[in-house]
Image (cartoon, grey):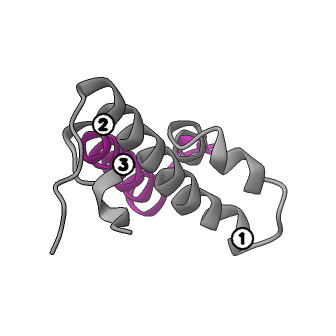
């Protein structure tokens, strides 16, 4: 079974591009912007990958941040499946 068919469509790729842009913004904010108080930029990474990433929020350490990656993958696959379903495009048979 070819799993890439869920990710190689305009909707899933556009979503992953938005997630990458938000993660870039969060990284720049965390590393280069000085705040007098705490910044809530990191919250956007969880919000843009919700609801799947919110299942990981309460886990300790790096596991919470792994939820962002898991959420992006799950949501992109769901969006890709929805795109294929709505557009009526079926995957080409492979040899």
How far apart in space, not on screen, are marks 2 and 1 (Cα)? 31 Å
- Nearest to the eye among marks 2 and 1: give it: 2
Residue 86, label in figure: none
**Could you tell whether 33 is left or right of 67 in the image?**
left
10 Å crowding of disc 3: few (<14), some (14-19), many (20+): some
Which residue does the numbered mark 2 point to in the structure image?
84
Which residue does the numbered mark 1 point to in the structure image?
63
Which residue does the numbered mark 3 point to in the structure image?
25
Which residue corresponds to the image point at 30% horizontal and 37% vertical from the top-left?
A: 84
Residue 25: give x, y in percent of width and height. 36, 48
Does the magenta stretch mainly form a helix, a strand or a loop? helix
Element type at mark 1: helix
10 Å crowding of disc 1: few (<14), some (14-19), many (20+): few
Residue 83 location, quadrant:
top left
10 Å crowding of disc 2: few (<14), some (14-19), many (20+): some
Residue 71: give x, y in percent of width and height. 57, 52
Q: Is residue 68 above or below residue 61?
A: above
Which quadrant, please, contains the C terminus?
A: bottom left
The tag earlier along the polypeptide, 3 or 2, is 3
User: In the image, which residues are magenta?
Assistant: 12-41
- Nearest to the eye among marks 3 and 1: give it: 1
Which quadrant, please, contains the N terminus?
A: bottom left
């Amino acid at each position: 079974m070819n799993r890439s068919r869920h990710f190689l469509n305009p909707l899933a790729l556009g979503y992953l591009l938005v997630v990458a842009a938000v993660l870039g913004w969060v990284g720049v904010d965390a590393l280069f912007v000085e705040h007098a108080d705490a910044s809530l930029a990191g919250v956007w990474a969880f919000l843009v990958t919700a609801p799947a990433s919110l299942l990981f929020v309460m886990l300790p350490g790096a596991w919470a941040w792994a939820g962002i990656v898991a959420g992006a993958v799950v949501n992109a696959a769901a969006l890709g499946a929805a795109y294929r379903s709505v557009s009526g495009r079926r995957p080409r048979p492979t040899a």
